[in-house]
Image (cartoon, grey):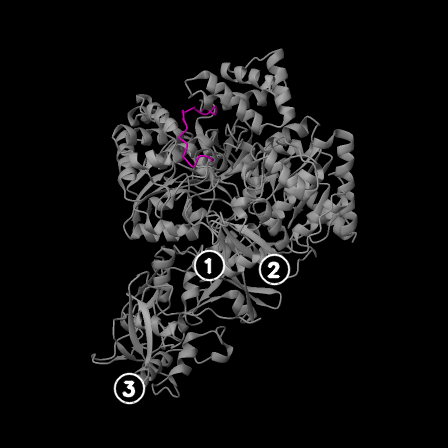
Amino acid sequence: MSINKQQDFGTPASAALQTVTLEIDGFKVTAPVGTSVMRAAASIGIDIPKLCATDSVEPFGSCRLCVVQIEGGRGMPASCTTPVAEGLKVSTQSPKLADVRRGVMELYISDHPLDCLTCSANGDCELQDMAGAVGLREVRYNPAGENHLSAVKDESNPYFSFDPSKCIVCSRCVRACEETQGTFALTIDGRGFDSKVSPSQNQSFLSSECVSCGACVQACPTATLMEKSVIDHGQPEHAIVTTCAYCGVGCSFRAEMKGEQVIRMVPNKDGQANHGHSCVKGRFAFGYATHKDRVTKPMIRANISDPWKEVSWEEAINHAASELRRLQGKYGKDSIGSITSSRCTNEEVYLMQKLTRAGFGNNNVDTCARVCHSPTGYGLKQTFGESSGTQDFDSVMEADVIMVIGANPTDGHPVFASLMKKRLREGANLIVVDPRQIDLVKTPHVAADYHLKLRPSTNVALMNALAYVVVTENLVDEAFVNERCDMASFNKWRSFISQDMHSPEAAETITGVPAADVRAAARLYATGKNSAIYYGLGVTEHSQGSTTVISIANLAMATGNLGRKGVGVNPLRGQNNVQGSCDMGSFPHEYPGYRHVSDDITRGLFETTWHKELSPEPGLRIPNMFEAAIDKSFMGLYVQGEDIAQSDPDIQHVHAALRSMECVIVQDLFLNETAKFAHVFFPGSSFLEKNGTFTNAERRISPVRKVMTPLAKYQDWEVTQMLSNAMGYPMNYNHPSEIMAELASLTPTFAGVSYEKIDQLGSIQWPCNDETPNGTPIMHKDEFMRDDGKGLFMLTGYVPTAEKVTPKFPLILTTGRILSQYNVGAQTRRTDNNVWHAEDILEIHPHDAEDRGVNNQDWVGIKSRSGETVLRALISERVQPGIVYTTFHFPESGANVITTDNSDWATNCPEYKVTAVQVTKVSQQSEWQKDYQAFSEDQLDLLAQGMAHD
Amino acid sequence: MSNKTEKLVKMANDISNFFNAESNKTLAAEGVKKHIMRAWEPRMRKEIIEYSQKDGTGLSTLATEAIKLLAID
């Protein structure tokens, strides 16, 4: 293995189809129009010296190192800014060019520390490389002259250092921050000799607007911006391409290693989801994988009040199998079940549902998508015929109008947000539908044309109002609808939606959004050449989550915004493998590929392959499992990689359910909140310790590769297999590729997927079969995936939520996430990301704060019908009066103590986004927080006792 | 009514609220029935049918009609 550095072509590729042919150093080269001479040269192996150019940002032409000579041309133009032209004859080497380059390098080196041997970039420094390339042998300038060698380092960022003494002011970092990330946190301050890179207004990196995405570090050609892990450990010696385990963007990374130690995670330039970009989580927050809190030995105990006992894998597996069989003997076959995780690989999820359906003999398997995007699965399956988004991420670059509904991409899906912002800077229009002022509403060089600031829970009313305008103002794409959609359903829908009760004027009383804005936004969406909808949990996590998804699908179909680039309905999936975990059949009513368990033909296929008769009845969903547990009819649960004791709503009810069960098996990296209620603990493996695949929000199946030995010996799929064998249902896979092969043989949309093909193509977007052997970036191009090929319109009546504000609970609490933390925080809380967000806080509008005498940083009690918790207050105009907002990344916050058991009518996805609360100034933690803290401390003590006996 | 039954009643009513947009109430009831049939575990279906037949308080008109169809299946 080697580090195998990725080639830098110097300037970005041109997308032009027309090509020209030129001659470089006597070699003919054909390149697309718009390609730079530098890139054309690099494409045939001629590396022109360069410093300020890199292929992730547009050329700048400042360093003058890449000068070339062109026959018949004047002077020595920079090859990075000179486009190719037909018949051009270019020389990249000549004595004159060599003189100029040496002179340029001499000037750079005259103000650069000569500490190469002890420099952290030694061996990976472009300045060093260029000095060698141009043959610099001496620096004639007086070293005692004015210089920047004593400039002070900025060590404020936990992950990288900024050493201005090594800066050559090439502006690559500034341009990366602007062009790649779109934050514009960096600038060149001063002029001439005083020019220097400056975060924001001469601030430290940590206190600036920098979001720590790492684009600047990636772009830096010297040791000026350098990962602290490289400073500490030295340069990596080999690299393995794998896929990030954080959000649903699914960025491809090179894990750069030294032996089994990850030195750094570098975004893969060839990554088809991220194109070489990253965010603070994927780029830097991987330290949790080797955190001291990892539990690496299997453990068992009889009661949750007992100390844990470390045991061998064999004992733990046999104990778990015996307990599950005991429970089935005592309470019936249907008394046990499992929960799969969107953080685990496709292959692990597939095995979990197989174990449940074939090994347990029931369909009591559910997944954490239950609490996030299950309404997406339902709504898009009903209307389009497939439970997935319609586009690839790159499609956004052809969108003319972008509507973002209930999503906060800059925090939740930051790498995709950067791509979206790039398109918005190019001039696409933006409509934001969100109760809160998310960053996208106004961010550098981006401003929403319309921010429809609706009241939480009124999505359907707003979507219906948009559709009303489309229908009543004759903005329907009749040709598309006639050709592509089920006309009976369309005619019924048209008649339904044109009723005046759906008009923007009528809806205004419900949503609070001015009718004129709704009308204007609807016209913009309907008449934009390409209009695309992106949505998130602000759509799904409502009692009408599925209805809103359906209304989005209706709107896209009515306006013909489906089936080509630049348009579509795009759910932004929260976790890395939400799409995949759903695809793999972890809903209790569906086999892999979203086929109902009652379908005899499908069930027969699985029965034949699995050699087991399978139940035709749907199993229990997660909330139904809890109800059944309290009812003493569901007594055993195997949870892989999920933390339901923190993430699920009405958490006191969840805790009661967990306490009711006789055997809770948790498989996780850490003793998470759920494990505190468990009887068996299987230590899990991180994404760095396993092979498999993740499927991102654009249906892209990407490789996950083992870069280190599992700390607890086994990959997670191996543990599930051992448990299955111990329960008497044999599984004999030697590698996850065999699991994928089985899935592909049973699932038409995956029929063409194999590890060999993933390796060959880098990733594959399903459907992938004989018709689309290389996958499907854009779905529903010619017809929808319903049986008749037609898109189905459905009626979407607005039904007010049961969660009402009252004088006792006058505010609406809504929840979301923040850039630096991830979901329940189990991973990011164990990294330095805490410097940005060390606790959950409550955002409250100044008017509501003033009414309650609340100041910034005050402790405030938040009380709902379900419970009470206490957080610190942040007074913010990002929320409207009457609405408060918090995140849910810290268990002690108890955000889900307050949320209710209201849920989506179709899928039971919890209504996290709407909880009526009262907020008051308090001086201490809530009773729940005190009790839970005591319980949690006891559990950690029981863990320590178990480990001490080892 | 137990807490568990109460939740099933709420779920059935929530499903019915969606299908209430359908003006043809026969189709609406069929839609509710089909949804429950495909999504609810048999124990839940049995419980809501029994509750509907014994008492039924709290169930909406459409939910009640749908559960009657469910019982026939």
**Residue A79 vs residue A57, the one in the foreground:** A79
Q: Which residue is mark 1?
A: A271
Query: Visible in this render: residue A937?
Result: no
What chain does badge 2 belong to? A
Q: Which residue is mark 3?
A: A96
Q: Is residue A323 left or right of residue A809?
A: right
What chain does badge 3 belong to? A
Quarter of the view holding residue A536? top left
Query: Visible in this render: residue A100?
Result: yes
Q: Which residue is mark 2?
A: A706
Q: Residue at x 34, y 52 (%)?
A: A397
Q: Which amino acid is tagged 2?
A: Lys
- Contact between labelled residues 3 and 2, with CB atoms less than 8 Å apart: no
Estimate the x, y position of residue B34 in percent, counting from the top left.
53, 24
> Is label 1 in a helix, a strand or a loop?
loop
Magenta stretch?
A787-804
Task: Calculate the distance from the C-alpha at mark 2 to the C-alpha at mark 3.
Answer: 50 Å
Residue A598 position (above or below residue A225): above
Task: Calculate the distance from the C-alpha at mark 1 to the C-alpha at mark 2.
Answer: 18 Å
- Contact between labelled residues 3 and 1, with CB atoms less than 8 Å apart: no
Quadrant assignment for the N terminus of chain A: bottom right
**Residue A267 vs residue A705, the one in the foreground:** A705
For marks 1 and 2 on the same chain, the one whose residue lies earlier in the sequence: 1
For marks 1 and 3 on the same chain, the one whose residue lies earlier in the sequence: 3
Q: Which amino acid is tagged 3?
A: Lys
